[in-house]
Amino acid sequence: MQVLEAIFGTIKSLDSGLVLILVFFIIGLIIRMKPLKALSAGLTFGIALTGVNMVTGYITGSVSGAAAAFAENAGNTNLIALDMGWGAALGIAWQWKLAFLMFPLHILVNLIMLVLGKTFTLNVDMWNVANKVATGFFVYCVSGSVIVGFAVTAVQAVLELLIGDANRYAVEKISGVPGVTLPHPMFLNMPLFWPLQKLLDKIIPSNKTLDAAALKEKIGFFAETPTIGFILGTLMGLIGKYSVVDSLMVGLKLATGLTLIPLAAKLFMTALTPISDAANEFISKRFPGKELCIGLDWPILAGASEIYISAIISVPFVLLLALVLPFNTVLPLAGILYLCVPITAYLMYEGDLIKMIITNIVTIPFTLYAATYFSPMLHRLALEVGTDLSGLAAGQQLAWYGIDIGFIRWFACEATVGNIVAIAFVILYAVLTFFYLKERKVKEAEIAKELGK
C-alpha cells in the first residue's frame, strides 16, 4: 500500500502536462514508435496542453476581476461562499488521504471494460483522476462510507468510457483528430441535455445553424473572434464599474486570449496524428478486427471560438442569477468563465452558437445550487488538510462554481442516504443514458459513413 501511495503520490504531484508527456511516451514505446518520435509527440502534446491552460487561465483572470467588482457593488451579503475555481478545488481534493487509490481504480475499471469488450477507449487522461477523487470524497462525506464513495466513482468511470465510445466519430469530425475521444466527466451531462437538444433541434433546424464562421459571414469584422472578445471584455469592465481605460484593457486581454488559444490548440493535431497512426497499425497487426481509441482531456477542442463566446456571453447571467436566486450562497469568481457546459454543448450541437448559449444559460441555476450544496464539504476538506484560509472573513467558505457534473453528483450523493427524489433522479438518468446511447449508435454510424470509415 505504501509503494502504491508513493508511486501515485508522485504522479499526482506533477503538472498535467508533465504527466501526459510521460504517458504518451510510454504509449508510444508500447505501440512500437521510435523512442525519439514518441518523446517528440508527448512533448508536443504537453506543450499544447500547457499553452491552452495558460491562455484559458489568462482569459478567466481577465473576466473574474470585473465580475467580482460587479458583485461587490451589488452588495449581496448572502454570498458567503467564494468560488476558488477548478484548479484550487481539485488541488484540495488531491489532498484527501485516500486520493491515491483513485489511480488504480481508474486503471482497473478501464482494463476490465477493455478485456470484456465493453469499451474500445483507453483512457489516458490521468489528470482528471482528480475528478474521481472529488466524487469519491463528496459521496463519502454524505454517506459516511468509503466503500460507497469508491463504488459510485467506479460507476462514473464506466459511464465516462461508454459516453466516450458513443461520441468517437463526433469528436473526430469536429476536431479533425482521428482515433481519439473524450471520456471527460463533463460529458456525463450529455444524457441530461439530450431532451433539450431534441427540443432545440426542432425549434432551430439545422439549416439555421449559426457558428462562428456563419456569424462572421453575416456581420464581418464584428463577428471576428478578437472583436467579440474586445467588445464583451469592455462591457464586462463597464458592468463592474471599471474606468473606461481599465474596461478597454479587459477587452484587450480577452481579445488576446481568444486569438492565442486556437494557435496553441493546433499543436494537439501535430502531437496526436503520429500516435493515432501508430496505435491503429499496432492494433490492426496484433488484434485483427479490434479497434482502440485514445481517451483524452477536452483541450483537443480548445481551438473552437464558439466555446469561449458562449461562455463569455453567459457571464452576466451567472452574476445576475447568483444575486437573485434564493438559497444560493456562492459568489462566482475564479470559475465564472465556466467552460464545461459550453464544451459539452459544442460537441452536441457541432458548434451551433444559439443552441450552445441557450443550453448554457438554462443550466446556470443548477450549477449555482450544486456549488452551494458542495461548498461546506470542500471547506471541511480544506480545513482538514491545513489549507491557508486566512484570507477569508468570518463566516465565509470556499466554493467551486462550475463543479463538473455538479447536478449529477448532488443527486448521486443524496441517493446514497435514501433521498427519494434523488433516487428517482438517478433512475431517470439511467433511463435517459440508455436511450441516449442507443440513439448515438445510429448517429455515429452516420458520421462514420460521412468520414469514409
Image (cartoon, helix red, strand yellow):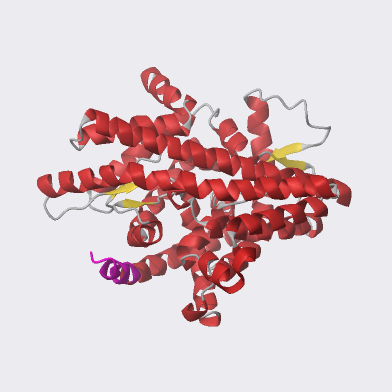
Identify the image quadrant of residue 448: bottom left
Of residues 156 and 186, which is closer to you in this image?
Answer: 186
Of residues 423 and 74, which is closer to you in this image?
Answer: 74
Quadrant assignment for the C terminus: bottom left
x, y percentage for residue 379? 68, 35
Of residues 356 and 127, which is closer to you in this image?
Answer: 356
Relative horizontal placement of residue 404, taking residue 287 as reference (left or right):
right
Relative horizontal placement of residue 323, taking residue 340 as reference (left or right):
right
Relative horizontal placement of residue 360, taking residue 111 as reference (left or right):
right
Say if residue 427 shows up in the picture. Answer: no
Residue at 41 percent across and 31 percent down: it is 19
The vertical placement of 224 against 280, above or below, is below
Say if residue 289 shows up in the picture. Answer: yes
Residue range corresponding to the magenta coloring: 443-453
Residue at 62 percent across and 34 percent down: it is 88
x, y percentage for residue 423? 54, 59
Residue at 40 percent across and 56 percent down: it is 175
x, y percentage for residue 298? 46, 49
Magenta span contains residue 449: yes
Magenta stretch secondary structure, dominant: helix
